[in-house]
Image: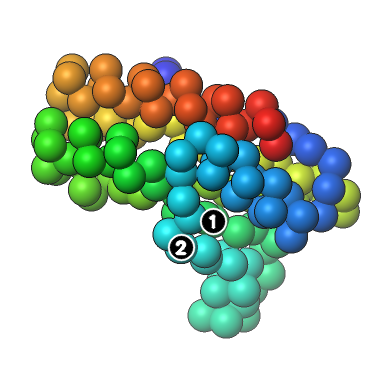
């Protein structure tokens, strides 16, 4: 099965990891559109606890525009998610969605090809984190 995300572990705090991920994505042309503190929402809605987990909605406007023009159904798969999750105190998992993995859902070869360019940006950002 093809990867749906690229990930690595780093030694850091959740909040500082978020700053590092945001900066690395910005360096590759992505902006952060949204932030969901999943652990807080789970606690608020269910009373249950999970490890600190933050989901950032990231978007590269130029790549999103190209993808949308190729197939407007892509809007359902945007933005790309970046997940910052505490594995244990001081160890963070950084997981960035693989655009090509998401685009394969639509079965559009042109879109999957465009997504490979986005994959390269995402992988470079992850390496910088």
Residue 116, by quadrant, is: top left
Where's the N terminus, which quadrant? top left
Residue found at x 62% / y 40%: 24
**How far from the left and from the top, in percent, is residue 36?**
52, 65
Per the rendering, the mark at residue 55 is 1
Q: Position of residue 41 (x, y in %)?
A: 55, 74
Tags 2 and 1 touching, CB below 8 Å: yes
Q: Residues within 10 Å of mark 2 (few under 14, many from 20)?
A: few
Q: Element at badge 1?
A: strand
Q: Check disc 1: other Cα within 10 Å, few if <14, some if 14-19, many if 20+.
A: many
Q: Which coloring applies here?
A: rainbow
Q: Residue 108, can we see it? A: yes
* Among the two numbered marks 2 and 1 on one chain, the one whose residue lies closer to the N terminus: 2
| Residue drawn 43% across the image and 59% down it | 33
Q: Position of residue 15 (x, y in %)?
A: 74, 60
Distance, label 2 to label 1, CA atoms, is 8 Å
Q: Which mark is residue 34?
A: 2
Left or right of 14: which side holds 66? Answer: left
Vertical relation: 120 (above or below) 98: above
**Image quarter in which the C terminus is found:** top right
Number of numbered callouts drawn: 2
- Seen from the viewer's position, the closer of residues 80 and 22 is 22
**Vertically, is 22 above or below 116?**
below
């Amino acid at each position: 099965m093809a990867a749906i995300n690229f990930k690595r572990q780093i030694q850091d705090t959740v909040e500082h990891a978020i700053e590092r991920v945001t900066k690395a994505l910005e360096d590759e042309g992505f902006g952060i559109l949204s932030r969901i503190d999943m652990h807080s929402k789970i606690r608020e809605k269910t009373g249950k606890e999970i490890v600190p987990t933050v989901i950032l909605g990231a978007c590269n406007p130029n790549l999103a525009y190209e993808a949308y023009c190729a197939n407007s159904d892509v809007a359902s798969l945007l933005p790309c998610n970046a997940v910052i999750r505490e594995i244990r105190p001081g160890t963070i998992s950084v997981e960035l969605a693989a655009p090509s993995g998401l685009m394969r859902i639509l079965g559009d070869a042109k879109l999957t090809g465009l997504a490979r360019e986005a994959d390269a940006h995402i992988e470079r950002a992850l390496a910088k984190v």
